[in-house]
Amino acid sequence: MIYAANFKTNHTRKSTENYIVELNKKLQAKNTEDKVYIFPPSSALGTYEGDFTQGAQNAYAAQNGAYTGEIGVDQLDEFGIKTILIGHSERREYMAETQEKVAAKFAFFKEQGFEIIYCIGEPLEIREKGFESVMQYLLSQFEGIDSTYENLIVAYEPIWAIGTGRSATVEEISTTHRALKKAINEKPLLYGGSAKPANIKEITSIAGVDGVLVGSASLDAESFSQMVLS
Ligand code: PEP
């Protein structure tokens, strides 16, 4: 299983360092075949050691240059970072990343050989229209995306389940993952949306779920490691 912690705009460098010290202690008991990822905010990226991979929540599609407020590949290289989240619904919504922009970013980081965790997910009004609409919406988020890319991991994150405390049901995750798996050439597929210690076992037991992308419940090292060790 894959367990990925997305800190979003939470944690400082100091608290990330403390988190990693605590996490590393807990991860000594982790199954070797499970994989852990940590996505700190840009200001807390560092040269951390442990049984996990550090990734970037975002970066600009450039090696370096005049892109005020952004970081590029040079800044990620400094910490040996070769994993990036692309297409998160918060970036699509708050940072106005259109499918076209997301696809261009994907193409750039693919060219750089990055491992990409590519996020997709439907809003509530689409889910309420039924499964066919959901799949149509999700598949439209693959426009311009090379779903055969060897370093691709997909994260299915229904927007209505993100940060709301309301996870998708087992049935919703199961049917959506089954359909998505076919569409993405059986690439690893994570679920994201209010995953937490109380529901992690249920979620990771669903066929077609290869792991979880966790926001809120990943902010506390104890809670996240409980999930990893579940
Ligand atoms: C996310 O935003 O990737 C996420 C899954 O958040 P949460 O776990 O808080 O729903």
Image (cartoon, grey):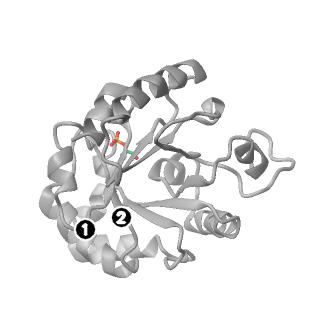
Could you say which disc has been placed on residue 189 in the image? Answer: 2
**Crowd tier of the residue under label 2, counting other residues whose Cα lies within 10 Å: few below 14, some 14–19, many 20 or above:** many
Residue type at mark 2 is: Leu
Q: Is residue 30 above or below residue 33?
A: above
Amino acid type at circle 1 is Gly
Q: Quadrant of residue 169?
A: bottom left
At 77% across and 56% down in the image, what residue appears? 62
Left or right: 226 as drawn, with respect to 67: left
Few, some or many residues within 10 Å of mark 1 (<14, 14–19, 20+) = many
| Label number found at residue 148 | none
Q: Position of residue 131 (x, y in %)?
A: 22, 72
Using the image as rendered, state which of residue 179 and residue 102 is in the foreground. Answer: 179
Q: Quadrant of the N terminus?
A: bottom left
Front-lying residue, 9 or 214? 214
Horizontal and vertical percent position of residue 104: 66, 68
Relative vertical location of residue 105 with respect to residue 49 in this rendering, above or below: below
Q: Is residue 220 visible?
A: no
Tag 1, which secondary structure?
A: loop
Task: Report whether the residue tagged 1 is closer than 8 Å to ligand 1.
Answer: no
Residue at x-position 29% and y-position 70%: 134
Q: Is residue 197 visible?
A: yes
The residue carrying mark 1 is 208
Q: Secondary structure at mark 2?
A: strand
Nearest the eye: 149 or 23: 23
Do residues under tags 1 and 2 come within 8 Å of each other at their CB atoms?
A: yes
The residue at the point 21 percent across, 41 percent down is 230
| Mark 1 vs mark 2, CA separation in Å | 7 Å
Q: Quadrant of ligand 1?
A: top left
